[in-house]
Image: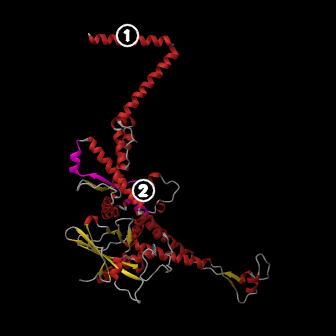
Amino acid sequence: MNSLESEYLKLETERHTILERARDSARLTLPTLIPDEGDSKHTKFITPYQSVGARGVNNLASSLLLSLLPPNEPFARLLIDDKAKREVEGIEDVKSEVEIALADMERAIMREIESNSFRVGLFEALKHLIVGGNILIHIPSEGGMRVFHLSSYVIQRDPMGNVDRIITKETISINHVSEEVREAIGELTKDSKDTVDLYTCVQTLPNDQVEVHQEINGNVVKGSEGTYKADESPYIALRLNRVDGEDYGRGYVEEYIGALESLEGLTQSIVEGSAASAKVLYLVAPNGTTRASTLANAPNGAIREGNATDVSTLQVQKGADFRVALEAITQIRETLNFAFMLTEGAIRQAERVTAEEVRLVTQSLEKQLGGIYSVLSQEFQLPLVKILMRRMQKANKLPKLPKGFVTPVIVTGVDALGRGQDLNKLDSFVAGISQVLGPEALSQHVNVSEYLSRRASALGIDTKGLVKSEEELQAEMQAAQQQQQQQQQMQMMQTLGPEAIKSATSMNNTQANNNAQQGGA
């Protein structure tokens, strides 16, 4: 049986082309994100001439982060399974208690994410996905997530794109290892290095399980073996754009690499040409009466003898060429602004830009992420929820639920875009009725309570305690009627006097008694 080290070296050659493409994308965006082979923390990286790539990657990663892990809002809902729902459907109190308990569990999962700083690791992972297209996330039994860069792992997938095998490579110091790891290292000599390579294998088994073990120098590390369910594996291999039949994905930057390279070359030319144009150099005619030393030594405002025609200023005279380059740069920037959701560059510059135009531009930009949301919701968000639930149940932070009782459902990303479309259609429907038929027809035919409920659902807002119920509205109407009657009585008392009020009250009582007697007869 081959060691993990030999298997890693074999698969490393197949990863070479993917890694080089990722490095090419990093050079035009964030050079320190995926450095070249041999670079270290002491390497002085070359900064690109243009900053659109770096701004675009950071902006796109921030947008994805806010969508995948929104602050102060669960990104997943725990729904009761259909079979369990039918069992508790008729028992109102039990159903209400179960929904409250599930909401508490959702908030507990969010607290686990916040307390372990998952956002920091995810932001790093998203930048690698956008630039390189691939990243490996490890969620241990406790603590935050670890991020393995493309240069530190290899992967094999089956024809359907499912993970078949992952091998990671870590360089660790032998001074800070456990006894099990030291035993796997073997006997140390004077010539031994201070570091050692630790290989971890994640192998998918035929019985829908995942087996994990670690090796050093071909020796298995004791205590590193473990078996997990396939959907609860702590290793999540992500790819931004799936390519059928390939083990690795493609990055978002790779799709716009041509525009970035063109912008980099044109910007470099403009910067270097502008620096040359900014240099001031005077030329003195060799046969003229004016001497160069006279000009060089003359202070500002001094009076010297000479002929102005003997002196000239050296000029590049490339303004027309620079103008063509600047126009090309402007067009390329507009393309990249749309691609990386830089809305301040996507909205046209004019005196009258309506709010509706800004909303439409923003909405069109968000639609670009639909495909990315689809991949990340299935390959990251859903496995993350299942892993955290399993981890928290082992730590007694969540109650253990019967198998098949609860199903986690992602409510951000693509689902949020779908709810946004429903909201736009709903608002357009109501606004159209008001404009075409008038406000009276709107109030007559549209149920306001149902409209508020659907609008809150589209926005993902809990209306409990926020929107008044029918009972509360009726109680307020009765209270308003009573208050109105009291005000009318007060006005009558001031206008007609107490005797008139007493007489009117007596007549009303007499009429009421007569009606009661007639009804009894």
The one nearer the camera, 410 or 213, is 213
Q: Residue 478: percent from the left, percent from the top? A: 39, 27
Q: Residue 2: percent from the left, percent from the top? A: 25, 83
Q: Is residue 66 above or below residue 202?
A: above
Q: Is residue 79 magenta?
A: yes
**How many numbered discs sit on the rendered protein?**
2
Residue ID at (37%, 65%): 142
The quadrant holding residue 311 is bottom right
Q: Could you tell me if residue 364 is visible in this image?
A: no
Label 1, on which residue?
510
Residue ID at (27%, 64%): 231
Q: Could you tell me if residue 481 is visible in this image?
A: yes
The one nearer the camera, 463 or 172, is 172
- Check disc 1 and report its element: helix, strand or loop: helix
Q: Viewed as shown, does residue 335 lie left or right of 103?
A: right
Mark 1 is on which residue type? Thr
The quadrant holding residue 13 is bottom left
Q: Viewed as shown, does residue 270 lie left or right of 452?
A: right
Q: Is residue 282 magenta?
A: no
Residues at discs 2 and 1 in contact (Cβ within 8 Å):
no
Q: Residue 156: percent from the left, percent from the top? A: 27, 75
The quadrant holding residue 96 is top left
Region rendered in magenta: 62-90
State how far apart marks 2 and 1 are (Cα): 66 Å
Q: Residue 82: percent from the left, percent from the top? A: 22, 50
Label 2, on which residue?
71
**Which image quadrant: the N terminus?**
bottom left
Label 1 packing within 10 angstroms: few (<14), some (14-19), many (20+): few
Mark 2 is on which residue type? Pro
Q: Is residue 85 above or below residue 286?
A: above
Q: Earlier in the sequence, mark 2 or mark 1?
A: 2
Label 2 packing within 10 angstroms: few (<14), some (14-19), many (20+): few
